[in-house]
Image: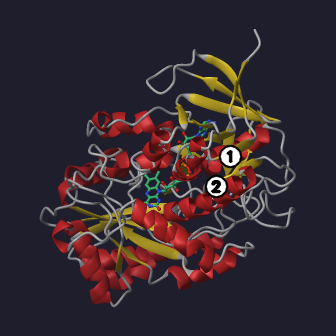
């Protein structure tokens, strides 16, 4: 039987930070008679889906439970498959790139003057604000006070919640839709203007002006029978995220030299310390402060965080009694997320296997390892300045270090103990692979997201980033996707 062909003017693939933004921006076209479809391989995340059970929730919305392994198996990658993409499970911290990072991108037209108004637009649309002091829990407050006592630069994260009830389960999907992800803000706006959402629709490839996709199941948003469809469109926008956008283009036969390459991801460590008394750690927004004291000099950023027992236990190095004790004392734990600012390398890349399935190849270099080790030392200093009775971190001589050992920190936390494969490294800020630029030898799209050598295929998501954002990326993804949508609109009208 021949695949059924369905015609649209614009087809957007993926509904995360990038695709959700584009759908909303192009929704006005529907009022002018254009037909716009948003194809999403996941289903709708409903408030009632959040049962507050960590493992079932993780397996429901994260790809591979949030633990997609790189080929060398020394890092896992977290991203979601759902309407709203990874914005359903993000924490909602909302930072803008600094000018020196925008300049480093060196993409024609992507300047402060271009990006700042777009940031302002999405800060407003997604209710970005600072939480008042009474909503900040002890895990966060301890970090802030310790950084101040150490004389380190510490700032409060703007966050994008509305009517937050402090449930603390942001990373399992919000049970009250307080986080203003694209599933809560941009996609409903797009649908109200006539954009057609087709859920459970997994795109395989692009063939000329046709997007070939398999509908996996029917639901409220999608009445198509299970099967393969060809969605024909004048303009096709690929917003499937930094792993799947390059993979879709590769399966479609594109072979730009830079395709899939220059992947960055802010590799991260979860580091925990135990206090004598219980501390208030799971209620309230999990992420209120960040310390960028060492971002320029040592290439790492420290953020407050709290991860539930399943995620935490896979981050601890070791087995047995020590691990049991830490998990058993969960309510005594203070946590820090250390993120490395990684540089784009052509060998860090997304590739596809013989079945077209994406695989990420990522190799840590000496600078990354040094940054990790320095970030652990800095975290230990924060924990002890907060009054912790013992600290556990990867890359240490023993499972715990104690306050009285602080003078020996350079010996106890050392590169010789930081063994790849034995330490648990994860990443959730996946960027690059379809980088923007003008030089076709090291970019995949032009500065407006249009794939080099085509006149109708665009990319609009984190894969466009030529360099890592150095800070949490979602606002920048929305800003660059807004720019791509502006270009597409101009071409259509
Ligand atoms: C746990 C976690 C916490 C985070 N916290 C923050 C934070 O606090 N602040 C911040 O700035 N960033 C945060 N991030 C990062 C942020 O969420 C992502 O950078 C951002 O959502 C990426 O946007 P994107 O559009 O590139 O991809 P995504 O948002 O991942 O969207 C891609 C979409 O494409 C769909 N898709 C993929 N393949 C196909 C296909 N073949 N066919 C159809 N659809 C497809 C996916 O299902 C998905 O919906 C966090 C991420 C995670 C995982």
| CB atoms of marks 1 and 2 within 8 Å | yes
Q: Residue at x 41, y 33 (%)?
A: 60
The extreme front residue here reads 32
Q: Which residue is mark 2?
A: 485
Query: Picture quarter containing residue 282?
Result: bottom left
The answer to whether one can see residue 372 in this image is yes
Q: Which residue is mark 1?
A: 237
The answer to whether one can see residue 412 in this image is no
Q: Secondary structure at mark 1?
A: strand
Place of residue 120 in the rendered image (x, y in percent of width and height, measured from the top left): 47, 71
The extreme left residue here reads 277
Q: Residue at x 26, y 45 (%)?
A: 176
Q: In this image, 285 relative to 29: left or right?
A: left
Q: Between tags 1 and 2, which lies in front?
A: 2
Instruction: Give the vertical position of 60 relative to 368 (above or below).
Output: above
Query: In whole angstroms, how far apart are the C-alphas of marks 1 and 2?
Result: 9 Å
């Amino acid at each position: 039987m021949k695949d059924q062909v369905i015609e649209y003017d614009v087809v957007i693939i993926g509904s995360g930070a990038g695709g959700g933004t584009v759908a909303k921006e192009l929704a006005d076209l529907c009022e002018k008679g254009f037909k716009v479809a948003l194809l999403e391989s996941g289903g709708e995340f409903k408030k009632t889906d959040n049962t507050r059970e960590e493992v079932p929730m993780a397996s429901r919305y994260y790809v591979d439970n949030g633990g997609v392994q790189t080929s060398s198996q020394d890092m896992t990658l977290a991203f979601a498959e759902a309407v709203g993409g990874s914005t359903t499970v993000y924490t909602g911290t909302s930072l803008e790139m600094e000018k020196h990072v925008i300049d480093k991108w060196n993409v024609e037209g992507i300047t402060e003057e271009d990006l700042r108004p777009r940031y302002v637009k999405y800060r407003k649309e997604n209710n970005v604000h600072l939480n008042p002091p009474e909503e900040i829990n002890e895990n966060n407050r301890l970090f802030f006070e310790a950084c101040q006592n150490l004389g380190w630069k510490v700032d409060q994260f703007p966050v994008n919640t509305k009517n937050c009830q402090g449930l603390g389960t942001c990373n399992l999907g919000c049970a009250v839709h307080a986080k203003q992800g694209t599933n809560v803000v941009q996609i409903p706006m797009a649908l109200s203007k006539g954009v057609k959402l087709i859920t459970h629709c997994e795109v395989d490839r692009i063939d000329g002006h046709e997007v070939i996709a398999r509908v996996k199941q029917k639901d409220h948003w999608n009445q198509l029978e299970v099967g393969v469809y060809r969605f024909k469109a004048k303009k096709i926008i690929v917003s499937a995220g930094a792993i799947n956008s390059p993979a879709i283009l590769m399966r479609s036969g594109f072979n730009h030299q830079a395709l899939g390459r220059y992947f960055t991801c802010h590799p991260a460590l979860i580091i925990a310390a135990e206090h004598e008394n219980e501390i208030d750690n799971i209620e309230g927004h999990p992420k209120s402060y960040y310390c960028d004291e060492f971002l320029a000099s040592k290439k790492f950023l420290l953020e407050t965080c709290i991860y539930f027992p399943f995620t935490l236990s896979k981050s601890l190095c070791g087995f047995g009694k020590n691990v049991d004790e830490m998990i058993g004392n969960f309510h005594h734990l203070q946590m820090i997320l250390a993120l490395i600012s990684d540089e784009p390398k052509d060998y860090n890349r997304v590739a596809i296997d013989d079945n077209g399935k994406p695989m990420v190849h990522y190799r840590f270099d000496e600078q990354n390892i040094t940054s990790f080790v320095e970030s652990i030392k800095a975290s230990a200093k924060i924990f002890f300045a907060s009054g912790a009775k013992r600290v556990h971190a990867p890359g240490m001589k023993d499972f715990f270090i104690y306050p009285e050992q602080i003078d020996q920190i350079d010996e106890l936390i050392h590169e010789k103990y930081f063994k790849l494969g034995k330490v648990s490294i994860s990443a959730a800020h996946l960027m690059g692979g379809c980088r923007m630029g003008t030089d076709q030898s090291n970019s995949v799209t032009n500065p407006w997201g249009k794939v080099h050598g085509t006149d109708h295929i665009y990319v609009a998501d984190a894969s466009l980033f030529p360099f890592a954002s150095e800070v949490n990326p979602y606002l920048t993804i929305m800003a660059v996707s807004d720019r791509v949508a502006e270009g597409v609109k101009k071409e259509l009208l």
